[in-house]
Image (spheres, helix red, strand yellow):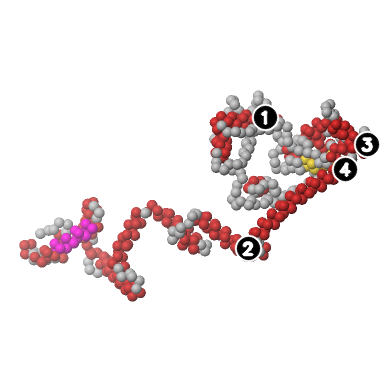
């Protein structure tokens, strides 16, 4: 008798089979073994194909290399080692449970649930295998953080601590708090600093500064007034008498240029400091007049040489103030009012009076304080990019405040049509509308464009689409540079 799946020679060697004379006990033993054998194969395979493959492998092992299965062979020795280690593990688990029970830790059921917990952990790993790389990344970051003495932060994150800000912000806040305290403790001035007293000093200084300006204005006014003669003591045919007669006239006044030429001393007494544009100087002051002790050019990098010559000729000394890092004078604004101007004409950069002075090696002095901007971000880039970080700037009172922002608009310039950018105009209109319609808006908005047509287009869109009451001012053709 042969049983399916059991090699005949294997059975014949290990059991005494005598055909019909085989004992019942032998058959029952073989049947039990075969049932256990089949059950074991069923547990190892997940489907029919796995079962067939395992059965073939075992058959080949038992038939072809059966010598390794003998008692004391390689397979038997490996099995004995495995059983020894397994028994050792069981004993350690039992000892651990016993220790926990003696310590009163409530772990009596740990041993019974051990394999169930292992299975649960493995199932969880398989279900969340897509998160494994994030977990590995966290373990790496955790190791680095602990190495940087940030274990309290790691514990807070792993405990799921509740916070109103993200972890990065939380770290920066606490780091800055620690840094500030460390710096303050090391500095006597900061350690004794009282904000209330400092604010009071600032307020007092501002009040004294305003009072000084008012007093200075009154002093200058009084000094000028003291040099004006009374009407009864005005000499005839003097500059004062000429001015007195012109003030009495109702019409046919003397042209201003002629009047100034006839009373140069009076002008300097009444107005020791005169602010005029280069065009006004040429219009109202004669070329041979030498009225001023010193002529000061502000924003000299924007003043062309031929505009400055006339002003220089009318003073005894000259101070030229400007920044060679700024853009030079340009012919761009000379053609803005020409509606028929060819937009392809090249815009030419002109040489400024500042460039001429620097080229002539006129003695110069660097002014490195920049005090005009309330927000330091307005000058930070230029300071480091163009001035090598040598400018002395003052930080803004609002941390993280930026006064300038860039918003890119996918606009298209209509070169052959209106010579405007309608998409850009619409974006400006939408931005203005959103600001004006915002709650509590009480400020003014200035719009600067390089062409009047674009400014007019923006105005028309605002007026037609939004029905807003707007005032529009077009720039004057004459430059507002002062001398």
Q: Main secondary structure of the magenta part?
A: helix
- Separation (CA) of disc 4 from disc 3: 14 Å
Task: Measure the C-alpha gap from mark 1 to mark 2.
Answer: 57 Å
**Front in this rendered view, residue 113 or 132:** 113
Q: Earlier in the sequence, mark 1 or mark 2?
A: 2
Name which of mark 4 and mark 2 comes first in the sequence. 2
Q: Earlier in the sequence, mark 4 or mark 3?
A: 4
Image marks 1 and 2: residues in contact by CB distance under 8 Å: no
The numbered mark, 1 or 4, whose residue comes first in the sequence reads 4
Check whether the beta carbons of the residues at disc 1 and disc 4 lie within 8 A of each other.
Answer: no
Magenta-drawn stretch contains 452: no
Mark 4 lies on a secondary structure that is loop
Whole-number angstrom distance, CA of label 2 to CA of label 3: 70 Å
The residue at 16%/59% (across/down) is 6
Callout 4 touching callout 2 (CB < 8 Å): no
Q: Is residue 32 magenta?
A: yes
First to last magenta residue range: 30-43
State the CA–CA distance, disc 1 to disc 3. 51 Å
Q: Residue furthest front?
A: 232
Question: Which label belongs to residue 336?
Answer: 1
Q: Nearer the viewer, mark 1 or mark 3?
A: 3
User: Is 263 placed left or right of 111 in the picture?
Assistant: right
Q: Residues within 10 Å of mark 1 (few under 14, many from 20)?
A: some
Q: Residue at label 4?
A: 227
The image shows residue 241, relative to residue 181, as above or below, that is above
- Packing grade of label 4 (10 A; few <14, some 14-19, many >=20) is few
């Amino acid at each position: 008798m042969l049983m399916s799946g059991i090699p005949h020679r294997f059975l014949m060697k290990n059991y005494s089979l005598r055909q019909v004379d085989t004992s019942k006990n032998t058959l029952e033993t073989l049947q039990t073994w075969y049932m256990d054998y089949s059950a074991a194969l069923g547990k190892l395979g997940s489907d029919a194909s796995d079962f067939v493959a395992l059965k073939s492998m075992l058959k080949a092992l038992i038939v072809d290399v059966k010598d390794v299965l003998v008692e004391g062979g390689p397979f038997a020795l490996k099995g004995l080692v495995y059983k020894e280690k397994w028994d050792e593990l069981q004993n350690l688990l039992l000892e651990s449970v016993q220790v926990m029970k003696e310590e009163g830790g409530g772990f009596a059921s740990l041993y019974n649930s051990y394999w169930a917990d292992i299975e649960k952990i493995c199932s969880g790993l398989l279900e969340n295998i897509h998160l494994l790389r994030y977990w590995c990344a966290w373990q790496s970051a955790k190791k680095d953080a602990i190495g940087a003495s940030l274990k309290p932060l790691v514990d807070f994150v792993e405990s799921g601590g509740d916070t109103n800000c993200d972890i990065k912000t939380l770290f920066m806040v606490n780091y800055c708090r620690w840094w500030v305290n460390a710096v303050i403790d090391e500095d006597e001035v900061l350690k004794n600093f009282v904000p209330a007293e400092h604010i009071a000093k600032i307020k007092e200084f501002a009040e004294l500064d305003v009072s000084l300006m008012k007093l200075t204005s009154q002093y200058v006014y009084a000094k000028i007034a003291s040099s004006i003669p009374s009407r009864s003591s005005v000499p005839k045919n003097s500059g004062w008498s000429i001015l007195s007669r012109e003030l009495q006239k109702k019409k046919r006044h003397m042209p201003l240029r002629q009047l100034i030429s006839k009373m140069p001393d009076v002008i300097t007494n009444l107005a020791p400091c005169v602010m005029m544009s280069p065009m006004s100087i040429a219009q109202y002051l004669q070329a041979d007049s030498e009225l001023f002790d010193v002529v000061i050019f502000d924003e000299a990098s924007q003043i062309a040489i031929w505009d400055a010559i006339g002003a220089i000729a009318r003073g005894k000394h000259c101070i030229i103030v400007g920044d060679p890092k700024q853009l030079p004078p340009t012919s761009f604004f000379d053609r803005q009012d020409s509606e028929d101007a060819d937009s392809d004409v090249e815009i030419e950069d002109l040489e400024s009076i500042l460039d001429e002075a620097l080229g002539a090696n006129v003695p110069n002095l660097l002014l490195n304080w920049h005090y005009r901007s309330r927000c330091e971000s307005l000058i930070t880039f230029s300071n480091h990019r163009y001035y090598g970080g040598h400018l002395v700037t003052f930080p803004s009172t609002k941390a993280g405040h930026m006064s300038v922002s860039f918003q890119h608009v996918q606009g298209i310039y209509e070169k052959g049509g209106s010579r405007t950018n309608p998409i850009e105009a619409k974006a400006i209109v939408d931005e203005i509308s959103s600001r004006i319609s915002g709650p509590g808006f009480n400020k003014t908005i200035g719009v600067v464009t390089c062409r009047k047509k674009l400014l007019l287009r923006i105005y028309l869109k605002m007026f037609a689409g939004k029905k807003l009451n707007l005032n529009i001012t077009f720039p004057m053709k004459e430059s507002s540079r002062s001398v």
